[in-house]
Structures are given as structure tokens and as C-alpha cells.
Image (cartoon, rainbow, N blue to C red):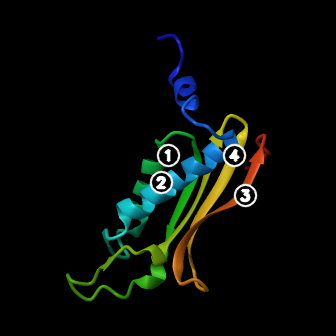
Amino acid sequence: MTENREALAARKFRCSTRERAMFEAGVKMGTIYHQFVGVPIDQDSADALEDAIEKGVLVQPYVESVKVRIDRGAFGPKRDEYSYRSLSGEMLEVVLVIRIDDVWVKAEMRHDLELKYPLMYISDTGQGWPEGR
């Protein structure tokens, strides 16, 4: 086998590079949501969980950047051993950038108040790699 793995994988996709980048963004967002929602969390563990989610996503193919924020407003004061919450979709804010070749896609997840739903969506796309991106 003389072809590299990326070339082999790319041949499987019957879509544009932009569409493939959008697909990859959806895979990553679904992974974050379905893997971590329900995890026990409190004010003291939120930083570590944000970091763990980011590091786990960054090792996946095509992830250029990811930022995870957990809404600390959902936590009350820790009164006793039972004072923790389970992570919910309403608590998550995620921004990630996928890049394949010179195509990039920015995807976001946040609780949409009007929809009352943790919406995942494509917020921007482009070609090339602008400075500061």
C-alpha cells in the first residue's frame, strides 16, 4: 500500500471538502454531547472537565481548535456530599474549528433560549486560512 491514509479516506467521501468538513464538525459535536452529558460535576470539577473535553476532541482528525465552557451559574453552593449536578446540554458552550486542506468550518453548540434546546450549528465557513483564525 503506497497511498497515505488520508488519500484512502478521502476517496470514500462523495461530497465536497466543505461538506466533509461540516460532516466532521457534526461528528465531533455529537461526540461531545453524547459522551459527556450526564457526567457528575460541581463547581470544583468544571475546569478539569472542560480541559478533558477539549483535549479529547483535539486528538481527533481535522480539529484545528476547540473551546469548551461549562456554565457555572448552574451550580449552587456546595452544602454537603450530595451537592453536585449532572452535566446537561444547557450547561455546555462549545466552539470548534475543523480544517481539511484549505477549507475550514466553525461549528458551535449552545443552549438556544428561544428553542429551549442545546443547538449545534455551523456558524462560519471559509477557504484559505485567514490570520488570527
Q: Position of residue 111 (x, y in %)?
A: 54, 77
Label 1: which residue?
Answer: 58
Q: Are marks 2 and 1 in contact (CB under 8 Å)?
A: yes
* SS for dot 1: helix
Q: Nearer the viewer, residue 91 or 12?
A: 12
Q: Residues within 10 Å of mark 1 (few under 14, many from 20)?
A: some
Residue type beneath disc 2 = Glu
Q: Quadrant of residue 16?
A: top right
Label 2: which residue?
Answer: 54
Marks 3 and 1: which is nearer the front?
3
Residue type beneath disc 4 = Trp
Q: Residues within 10 Å of mark 2 (few under 14, many from 20)?
A: some
Q: Quadrant of residue 103?
A: top right
Q: Nearer the viewer, residue 31 or 49?
A: 31
* SS for dot 4: strand
Residue drawn 65% across the image and 46% down it: 19
Q: Nearer the viewer, residue 96 or 8?
A: 8
Residue type beneath disc 3 = Asp
Cα gap from disc 4 to disc 1, whole angstroms: 15 Å
Q: Residues within 10 Å of mark 4 (few under 14, many from 20)?
A: many
Q: Earlier in the sequence, mark 3 or mark 1?
A: 1
Q: Earlier in the sequence, mark 4 or mark 2?
A: 2
